[in-house]
Image (cartoon, grey):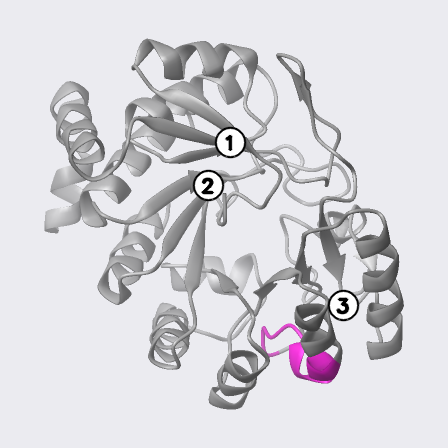
Amino acid sequence: MTSVEALYRQPWEELLEQAWALRRAHFPPVLELAVPGAKRYQMEGFCNKRHRFAAISLTGGSCSLGCEHCRGQLLKSMYAASTGPALRRLADDLVARGCQGVLLSGGADRRGRVPLRDHLDAIGYLKEMGLKVIVHTGLADEATARDLKAVGVDQVLVDVIGDEETIRQVYHLDRKPEDYSATLALLKETGLAIAPHVVIGLHFGRIRGELSALEMIARVDPEALVLVVLNPLAGTPMVDSQPPSAEVVGRLAAVARILIPERRISMGCARPPGPGKVAMEHLAISAGINALAYPSASSLAHARSHALGTVWRELCCSLA
């Protein structure tokens, strides 16, 4: 058993106490509530605005990988802009409506890369418009990292997978966890701010490689970490998969806090619906996260029971 596995298997109260002590030592008593405009949200008199922060797919609904958990479903809720001129026109329209930032994402090619280099001039235009710009790279090469740094993107998001079978069976890529570790190191060495993502339960709801992914991430000292949870989607092979339990999510959040005690950790948008969602939020708050996307009303009360103030942010949770 590795040291991180031993940490994960500690009695819950001991693990929680250690994680919460680190949260208190390194951060102010505030939980940031991230509510970007991907979906309408209203709570306690606050209502977000549809166009304040926008998610854009650079490939429309197209993805070459057809990953088992998505099959392109996640792209459907995004604005589509598959050419540089289309991205510029969309940016003009969004800024006119009050947009302050965008996430550039899209489907990946057969090597696991999002085609960002095809849009570099337009990405530079977005920055000239005063927008915050964060990007999903997939597995990046040196040229992509260099060019993203040159155009001034504010943050880079990378899904990190720590299990080879998950990479093959879910993402359909002939890659290894070491390739994700190399991408993280390359982006960091290039001087880009990185916010790796870990999808808890990505292997058909089972835990395989999440702890290894957290170890890889901790080694590069990221600016932020985002934890999301498998949400089985209709129209995908995972529709009947059982998501991980709230306790598993809470334990992984606590381990993450201990591994990167001085870096912000967020619980992102993707979580399965129902009572389990609320329990996941509660345990993640108790484990010391800094930001929570689209919180339930119960979680606002839970945060306050931990003497945490709350502040609304109409941004992606990695930036909130």
The picture places residue 33, in percent across and down from the top left corner, at: 51, 30
Above or below, 165 against 235 in this view is below
Mark 3 vs mark 2: which is more N-terminal?
3
| Magenta residue span | 111-121
User: Relative to the observer, which residue lies in front, 138 or 209?
Assistant: 138
Circle 3/circle 2 CB separation < 8 Å: no
Q: Nearer the viewer, residue 31 or 17?
A: 31
Q: CA distance from mark 3 to mark 2?
A: 27 Å
Q: Which comes before the other along the chain, label 3 or label 1?
A: 3
Query: Looking at the rendering, which quadrant does residue 297 occupy?
Result: top right
Q: Quadrant of residue 150?
A: bottom right
Q: Position of residue 36 (x, y in %)?
A: 65, 40
> Residue 250 vs residue 173: left or right?
left
Res 253 visible:
yes
Disc 2 marks a residue whose amino acid type is Gly
In the figure, 311 relative to 192: above or below?
Answer: above
Q: Which mark is residue 260?
A: none
- Left or right: where 37 falls relative to 278: right
Q: Which residue is mark 1?
A: 243
In the image, which disc is placed on residue 201?
Answer: 2
Compared with 236, 154 (above or below) is below
Q: Mark 3: which secondary structure? A: loop
Q: Residue at x 20, y 39 (%)?
A: 26
Q: Which residue is mark 3?
A: 58
Residue 262 percent coordinates (x, y): 23, 48
Q: Position of residue 40 (x, y in %)?
A: 75, 29
- The kind of residue on which mark 1 rests is Pro
Rate crowding at label 1 as few (under 14), some (14 to 19) or many (20 or more) other CA atoms within 10 Å: many
Measure how far apart labels 1 and 2 are at the Cα level: 6 Å
Which mark lies nearer to you, 3 or 1? 3
